[in-house]
Amino acid sequence: MNISIVDAWRTREAREFFRNVWPMYVHELSGFDTSFYALDETGRWQPDLVDDWVSSVTPPGNLRAPRSAQDPMQPFQRAYVIASDARPVGFVCVGLRPFRYMPDDVDFSIAELFLIHGSRGTGAGRHALQLLLHRYPGRWHLCAIHDNARAIRFWTKTLPLLGVRDLETRHESGDVTWRFVAEG
């Protein structure tokens, strides 16, 4: 199994995969938090946050995409498609400081992680995270919904295997959060 992460900003195929798989991810999340996502009368998930991620990965020139002051070409969030043997199997979304949905004292946040069912338990998620943490060394944060036992088990098992430092687990606002440092 050869795992790679593909910056969805770089290829049309990765953007299209991300856009098409996002509703599957939201459907799964809706089983844990029915107060946030809901289907509208047309069958679309609301709020429709996919454009927040897709607009940040469209080529430069899209004025809706938030950009950093240090590098106007760099959005505050990035979406990566996870591929196994060059076949897309999921995605991971990363917030970069000052991403609005992360604490001020961290550099990066894993905002979303999704693998299609057939790729779960294969090591694809762990390998993709190794690549991601190598790409972005620094202080990290992530959160799992308190009812999502599978996600909590995954993160509890996987984070120590990634060789992160200063790993902290917290229970905040009913959810489980982790903070750690990745060396790169």
Image (cartoon, rainbow, N blue to C red):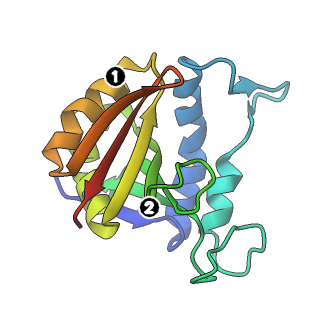
Q: Measure how far apart labels 2 and 1 are at the Cα level.
A: 26 Å
Residue at the image position 29 percent from the left and 34 percent from the top: 155
Residue 93, given in percent of the width and then of the height, sits at: 48, 52
Q: Give the mark toward the camera: 2 or 1.
A: 2
In the drawing, does residue 174 fall left or right of residue 53? left
Q: Residues within 10 Å of mark 1 (few under 14, many from 20)?
A: few
Q: Is residue 64 above or below residue 47?
A: below
Residue 107 badge: 2
In the drawing, does residue 135 fall left or right of residue 92? left
Q: Which residue is mark 1?
A: 150
Residue at the image position 45 percent from the left and 36 percent from the top: 143
Q: Is residue 116 above or below residue 131?
A: above
Residue 42, given in percent of the width and then of the height, sits at: 83, 29
In the drawing, does residue 39 fall left or right of residue 32? right
Q: Nearer the viewer, residue 21 or 172?
A: 172
Tag 1: residue type?
Answer: Arg
Q: Is residue 84 above or below residue 171?
A: below
Q: Are marks 2 and 1 in contact (CB under 8 Å)?
A: no
Q: Quadrant of the C terminus?
A: bottom left
Q: Nearer the viewer, residue 154 or 97?
A: 97
In the drawing, does residue 135 fall left or right of residue 21? left
